[in-house]
Every structure is written in C-alpha cells, then in structure tokens.
Amino acid sequence: MNGYVEAGYVVILGSLGTYAATLVGRERAARRRVRESSPSRPPASCPRPSDALRGARLRPSEPGPTSNPAPPGALSAGGTSAPGPEGTRPVAP
Amino acid sequence: MSSLQPTFRHGRVDAALLSLGVLALAGVVATVWLGLFVTPPDEFMGNLVRLLYVHPPMAWVAFLAYGVASLASLLYLWPRTRADHFDRLAGASAEVGVVFTGLTLISGSIWGRPTWGAWWVWDPLLTTTALLFVLYLGYLALRRVPGEFHVRARRSAIAALIAFIDVPIVYFSVEWWRSLHQAPSVLNPTTHKTYVHGSMAWTLLLGFVSFTLVYSWLVAHRYRLAKLQDLEDTEGLETALAERRAEAEGV
C-alpha cells in the first residue's frame, strides 16, 4: 500500500471519532447543567417566558437592576439588555 | 414548548442508542478490515481502490443527511406538521451532513493526488460538492443568528430547501458536463450496469450500511444535544424571570 490510503483512513476515522467524542461530551455537559439547574425552576403557577417576556432577552448570570425595578407583569420593559431583534428566545451564553 | 421535556430519564432510548453505536462501530471496523486487508488491489488503480470503500459512502451519507434535513424543513414549514422537533432534526442532520461532505472532499482529494496528479481540480463534481459544503455551512451559520424561535426556524427551513437544490446537481454533474471524475460505478443510471463485483462489492455495500448507521447515531446525539440546549435556554430564562419577579416583589 502507499501512504495515501493510510492517510485517507486516518483522516476519515480520526475526524469522525473526534466529532463523535465532542458531541457526546457536549451532550453530557448540557445534561449535567440541566440537572443542576432543575431545582431552581420556579413553581408551575408562574407564567412561562413566552407568555410574560415577549421581546426581552435575559440571562440568568446578569443581575437585574436593583434600583427602579420593573413592576410585576411589566418585565418586558425592564430587561437587563436590549430587546432582541425579533423576539423571545433567550440567547445562549 | 411542550416538547421540551428532559430526556435523560429515557433509559430505553439510551440503550437503543448504545446498541446502534456498537453496531455502527462494528460495521466500520469490519469495513476497514475488509477494505485494507482482505479485498484485492484493483487492476487499474492498484491499492488506491481501497479509498473507495469509504469515499462513496461518505458522499452517500452527506446526500442522505441533506435529504433528511430538507424533509424535516419541509415538515416544519407545512402548517399541519409544524413542530419544534422537525427544526431540531433538520439542524442536527445538516451539521452531520457538513462533516461528511468535508470528509468526502478530503478523501477525494487524497485519492485524486496520486490518480490525477493534483489535490484539487475545478471539475464540475468537485466544484458543486464544494459549493454544497459552503451552502450548508451558511445554513448552520444562519441557524445561529439570534431571533425568535419560530422565525429563526422558518428562515432556516427555507435556506435548507434552497441549499438542497445543489444535491441533484452534484449527483448528475458527471452526466451533464464533461468531467474528470468517473461516472457512478455501482449502479450507473445510463448503462444500468454494475462495475464492482465480489468481495469489493460486499465491502463497499458494508461501507454504505456502516456509515449510514454512524450517521444515524451522530444525528440522534446531535438532536438530543439540541433538545437539551433548548431546555437549558428555557430554564435559564425562567430562572431569570423568577429572580426579577422576586426583586420586584421585595421593593
């Protein structure tokens, strides 16, 4: 055999293996983060973001304003960042 | 939103996915073993034919991935079947398709250097395949543009369908234009003949099956990751809302 054949197999199998391992690792990390954040979920009686936050983008790591906070029910006007161009889906950090 | 339920408790799905992964791995190992050590060298290409046990399966999986992405996009755009999971499936399949397209280009280039004397030629098949790669890279970039979920999903679905137009162009380019790349050898649409026989044909067939299983396994994991990321986004937003609400009530 010549080096081209071996190189081809190494590139293909190596790339697929790396991609698969990365994917599994990212999935495990995401699963762990979801598990960790689950106890902090608000009660079911709270309105869902899609009901309450049309037009706002909030990140859990960013504290809300301590002075002049927005009143309950008017959260879309008091976000910590500018409203998204098109809507409600939060931006992944 | 009702589809955003935690998936990590689904032990049966995990077991099925593990079985699929083991089967795919066994198939790839068998393909590599047969391709490198069992099948004979080709009369004209010599040992370089061994690259063809993985190169056409890569291209096939890329086409399959884009076909699935387009079908899922179509189902998302159709009002009666619109659901978040079709958008996630389209994104997962397209991403895996891009990986396989990249590997198709690289393995073809490695085969082309000793055969044609060049790593790259502006052949119609190669050029349209490179265009396909770039189109779906653009699709993946478009998916990352922030926006309201359904707006983003709708424009991504339209982009996936537009990009898919290139798939039949890639496949038939060797028929439509004068090409350096050889015409299909397994099932030639013009001559209706098969040019691969014996252990070579079985190894190639096993390659197609194995890499299709690898594709299925990768898409399943990518889909689950996308679902978890959506769940994470929702949880993060709900937590932020709860914090804001608590602050507002505390004043």
Image (spheres, coloured by chain):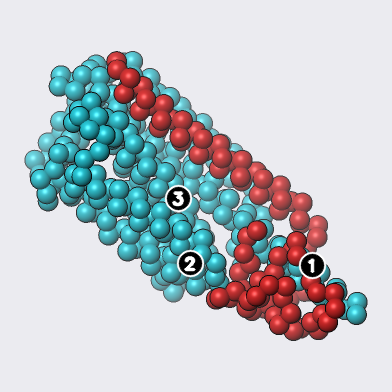
Chain colours: A red, B cyan
Asked if labels 3 and 1 touch by Cβ distance under 8 angstroms, the answer is no
Residue position marked by numbered label 3 in the rendering: B95
Asked if labels 2 and 1 touch by Cβ distance under 8 angstroms, the answer is no
Choose mark 1 or mark 3, whichever is in front. 1
Q: Nearer the viewer, residue B19 or B226?
A: B226
Picture layout, residue B33 above or below residue B6 = above
Residue position marked by numbered label 2 in the rendering: B153
Q: CA distance from mark 1 to mark 3?
A: 35 Å
Q: Quadrant of the C terminus of chain B?
A: bottom right
* Precedes in sequence: disc 2 or disc 3: 3
Q: Amino acid at mark 2?
A: Ala
What is the quadrant of residue B162 in the picture? bottom left
Mark 1: secondary structure: loop
Residue at image position (37%, 38%) is B103
What is the chain letter for disc 2? Answer: B
Q: Is residue B167 left or right of residue B249?
A: left
Do discs 1 and 2 belong to a common subunit? no
Q: Nearer the viewer, residue A44 or B239?
A: B239
Q: How many marks?
A: 3
Q: Is residue B62 in sight in this rendering?
A: yes
Residue at image position (35%, 44%) is B101
Picture layout, residue A21 above or below residue B76 = above
Q: Nearer the viewer, residue B105 or B211?
A: B105
Do discs 1 and 3 belong to a common subunit? no
Mark 3 packing: few (<14 Cα in 10 Å), some, or many (20+)? Answer: many
Q: Quadrant of the N terminus of chain B?
A: bottom right
Residue B116 image position (x, y, % from top left): 18, 31
What is the chain letter for disc 3? Answer: B
Residue position marked by numbered label 1 in the rendering: A63
Q: CA distance from mark 2 to mark 3?
A: 15 Å
